[in-house]
Amino acid sequence: MPGPLLSAIWYFGIVLEVAFVVCSVWRKSFFRYFFLNLYFLATLASGVVRYAVLSEFGQHSDQYRFAYFYTDVLLTLALYIALISLYTRIFAELEIGKYVRLTAVLLLAGTALFSYAVVAQSSDRLATTFAYELSQNLYFVGLVLTYILWGAILKLRETRTRLVQFVLALGIYFSAYAASYALFNLVSRYSVVFFLGPIVSCLLPLAWTTTMWRHSEESRLIPAQLVAVER
Amino acid sequence: MIWSITIFALSLATLLMFFVSYCRSLTAASSRHPLSREVRDVTGIEALPSGKDFVRVTQLLQLCPEHSEDRAGLQAVGLYYKILNFAQSRFAQTFPALQDWTERELAGCTNFAVVVLDRRIALSRAILAQEGEI
């Protein structure tokens, strides 16, 4: 079972995820940001599944490993869909939603094929290795897509405060997650790096809940103020 | 090893870029907020706030009842302020253009804190008024 500090971070994350969903309902924006809510609901559901498997079979069992990696890949997929939903909202006025969705499906299929090709040689534990590889690659694709979306926001001079802050928080989350994974590979002997991942996963619900609570759908920003170096 | 270092460096760079933009979106959202007479009297800021006022304003914030919706934003902007202050003290002499830019950004951070203070004063007044009615 995880230690008390990890459990505390885990519970804090759950509270923040519930807070986002409650906040969306309260602000009458649940369906407007349905896929963002769906991601947090999926996170809560995966938490329940993981906890049940952990209690039944223990942390080092194959069942827990399988449940962990497959719920992780499902969550990454849910976050990918949430990101694409932000894309369609940003590009709504250009009426290219159909092409955005088609590109997203092709990119997802390409990532899945690439992940399969990478792990196909190792026959043992193919299922969990594939889930792990797909999850990693989707995170990387997510980071690149968020970066492109941020560029589009600046180019299109997007003013909707909520959308801008949702995308930026997602960028922070993806970058921090990638940094924590890399740091884990570099200095895994230090126990502090074990806490980075769970702490980083609290950032996204915290930032999104704050945005949902503080800003209404009508809230607008001055686009020029978002560019770090004004031209 | 080299791959991990490269990923770490790249992700830190994008993290910093997104963090700066996120903080700018927070300060930009508060830039159009008209300041009340009360908050101007309390802070002594008549026209535009300057970066030097930030610490004093945050000390004033601690005197008001905390409002949970502002906490995360205030912490993020506080961290941004520290990063800017560090950049200004270390690199502004080498890159003079950085001096003006950081000064503008620091002023934006102070404005954000003043707007939060304004909200907290208004909230405290509303609570007092409600208690008075009871």
Image (tube, rainbow, N blue to C red):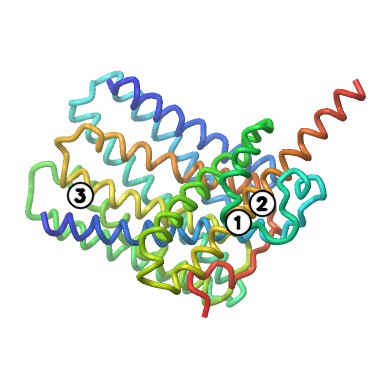
Q: CA distance from mark 1 to mark 3?
A: 35 Å
Q: In the rendered structure, are the residues bearing label 1 and label 3 in contact, judged by CB atoms less than 8 Å apart?
A: no
In depth, the one of A30 and A121 nearer the eye is A30
In the displayed orientation, state which residue is furthest to the right: B133
| Residue occupying image coordinates x 61% and y 61% | B28
In depth, the one of A114 and B44 nearer the eye is B44
**Is A20 on the left-hand or right-hand side of A113?**
right
The chain identifier of the residue carrying mark 1 reads A
**Is B13 on the left-hand or right-hand side of B97?**
left
Spot occupied by residue A185 in the image (x, y as percentages of width and height): 17, 46
Q: CA distance from mark 2 to mark 3?
A: 40 Å
- Image height of A161 relative to A3, above or below: below
Find residue A162 and name its label: 1
Find residue A215 and name its label: 2
Q: CA distance from mark 2 to mark 1?
A: 7 Å
Mark 2 residue type: His
Q: Which residue is mark 3?
A: A130
> What kind of element bears circle 3?
helix
Q: Quadrant of residue A223?
A: bottom right
Is the N terminus of chain A in the top left, top right, bottom left or bottom right quadrant? top left
Pick whichever of labels 1 and 3 is earlier in the sequence.
Answer: 3
**Is B122 on the left-hand or right-hand side of A202?**
right
> In front of the other: label 1 or label 3?
1
